Image (spheres, rainbow, N blue to C red):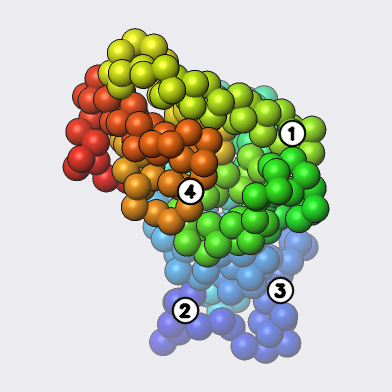
Amino acid sequence: MRRDTDDTEPSGPEGEAGLWPSGPEEEPALTVGRTAALVGVTVKTLHHWDSIGLVRPGGRTWAGHRVYSGDDIARLHRALVYKEIGFPLAEIVRILDDPDVDTHDHLRRQRDQLVERIARLQDMVGSVDRMMAASKRGMRLTPEEQVEIFGADWQPAWVEEAEARWGDSAQWAQYAERAAERTPEDWKATAAETEALTADLATAKRAGLTPGTPEANTLAERHRASISQYFDCTHTMHACIGRSYLTEPGYTDHFDALEPGLTAWLRDVIFANARARGVDPETAVWE
C-alpha cells in the first residue's frame, strides 16, 4: 500500500531536485521541503498552514505527495507579507479567501505601512549609532582645550575617572551622548554659566542668605539646572549630590577656596530646596 505523507520527500531524479510535474502538460510544482527552503519557513510551518487552510498545496505527484504550484507559492508570499506586518493567521486566511478584497489596493496600503516602519527603524538605528559613537567619544575636547576652557585647576583625568565609576549608569549614557554633540564653543558657554553661578553662590553665602528662602531655592534650582545640562537631574539626585559635597574628596577644596564654608552652605541650600519639593535629603537614594 502506498503511504501518503509529506514528511518524506519523494525520491528519484525529479524528487531530488524538488521539482515535479503536477500533471500532464502542467507546470512543474515544488515539494514541501523545496517550498519551505524557497520561502524561508520550516516544513512544520507549511504543514500547520495547510491544516488551517492558509496555504494548501494544490497538486499531487504520481506517488501521492503534495506539491505546491506557482499559484500556491504566490499565495505563500502574500501570506508571509501579511504575517510580517503583524496580521494574525486567521485574519490572513480571511483576506486571502475574500473575493471582495482588492488585493492590489490592500497590498499597496500594507506596503505604505512597511515603508513607514522601515523609516522608523532607520531613525532608531541612527539613534543607537549616535549613542554608540557618543559612548566612545564622550567629551570631544583635547586635554589642552579642557584646561583652557575649565581653568588651570581642571584635571582631564577626572573624565576618565568618572567614566570608570559611573560608566554603566543611565546618567553617564546621557552625559556621553550630549557631550559628544557639543562643540568647543558650547563648552565655553557652559563653563561661563557655571562660573557665573558659582560666583553668585559665593556672593549669596557671603551676604548671609538663609537656606530655604525663595532666593536660596532659586539658586538651588539654577544649580540643579546646571547639572541637568549633562544628565536629567531630579530633586532626589540633587540631594544625593549635595550630600556628596561633604563626603567626596575635592569638593570642599574647590568651593571653600571661593568662599569659606561655601561647601556646607551649598549642601544646606540644596537640602532645603529638596525638602520643599517633598524629598527627604537625608534618606534620598540615587534613582
| Separation (CA) of disc 1 from disc 2 | 72 Å
In percent of width and height, residue 29 lies at: 68, 65
Residue at 32 percent of width and 43 percent of height: 243
Observer able to see residue 234: no
Disc with the residue nearer the chain's start (3 vs 2): 2
Q: Is residue 38 above or below residue 187?
A: below
Amino acid found under the numbered disc labelled 3 = Leu
Are the residues at dot 3 and dot 4 in contact (C-beta closer than 8 Å)?
Answer: no
Amino acid found under the numbered disc labelled 2 = Asp
Disc with the residue nearer the chain's start (4 vs 2): 2
Q: Is residue 7 left or right of residue 178?
A: left
Amino acid found under the numbered disc labelled 1 = Lys
- For mark 1, what is the residue? 188
- Helix, strand or loop for disc 2: loop
In percent of width and height, residue 268 lies at: 30, 31
- Helix, strand or loop for disc 4: helix
In percent of width and height, residue 70 lies at: 70, 55
Disc with the residue nearer the chain's start (1 vs 3): 3
Amino acid found under the numbered disc labelled 4 = Asp
- For mark 3, what is the residue? 19
- For mark 2, what is the residue? 7
Query: Which is in the foreground here, disc 1 or disc 2?
Result: 1
Q: Is residue 147 above or below residue 167?
A: above
Near mark 1 (Cα within 10 A), the count class, few <14, some 14-19 or many ≥20, is some
- The quadrant in which residue 159 appears is bottom right
- For mark 4, what is the residue? 253
| Separation (CA) of disc 1 from disc 4 | 23 Å
In percent of width and height, residue 33 lies at: 58, 74
- Of residues 245 and 129, the one nearer the viewer is 245
Q: Which numbered circle lies on residue 43?
A: none
Are the residues at dot 3 and dot 2 in contact (C-beta closer than 8 Å)?
Answer: no
Disc with the residue nearer the chain's start (3 vs 4): 3
